[in-house]
Amino acid sequence: MYSIRAEQSFDAAHFLAGYQGKCSNIHGHRWRVVVQVGAGALEREGQLRGMVADFGDLKRELKSLTDVYDHTFIYESGSLREKTVEALEEEGFSLTGVPFRPTAENFARHFCDALEAKGYPVRAVEVYETPNNCAVYTRG
């Protein structure tokens, strides 16, 4: 099995609605996303001959996915009152609503699905909230 890895980081705040603990409060992370794509055989023809995928293309695609969240306040859609969202937007804050609880586990799945939709043979995605703690989503 051949594989390559690429990574990107972004800075963002979030909170976990309905969670009993410190993470129920707004806090920030330097999120680090590490993607591994792989194949049983390397490309045999064309520009990608001898490769799993082009590193540059993979890095650009991952960056375009993570840039959406950079320096934003990520929240689960429906977890804040509409007037709270409106007030924050009126103040000029950058908010990004997501259709899932913004955990590292859910982000790992999210980035995996997004890259697969672009045609990458994703094997695993790691999402670090801290330098020592990450969630991993793998494809069987």
Image (cartoon, rainbow, N blue to C red):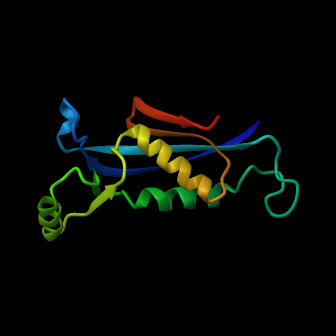
Quarter of the image for residue 128 reads top left
Q: Position of residue 131 (x, y in %)?
A: 39, 34
Tally of marks: 0
On the image, the x and y values in percent for residue 90 come to: 14, 70
- Please indicate, yes or no, whether residue 5 appears anywhere in the rendered image: yes
In the image, taking residue 40 as reference, residue 21 lies left or right, namely left
Quadrant holding the N terminus: top right
Answer with the quarter of the image where residue 2 lies: top right
The residue shown at (68%, 48%) is 121
Query: Where residue 4 sits: x, y (%)?
Result: 67, 44
Q: Is residue 7 in view?
A: no
What residue is shown at x 19% (from left), y 30% (from top)? 20
On-image quarter of the C terminus: top right
The picture places residue 7, in percent across and down from the top left corner, at 52, 47
Q: Nearer the viewer, residue 111 or 66?
A: 111
Give the left or right position of residue 2, taking residue 111 as reference.
right
Residue at 34%, 45% in the rendered image: 102
Determine the residue located farthest toward the front in the rendered image: 78
Can you say whether 53 is above or below 105 in the image? below
Q: Which quadrant of the view contains residue 38?
A: top right
Residue at image x 81%, y 63%? 47
Q: Is residue 112 above or below residue 129?
A: below
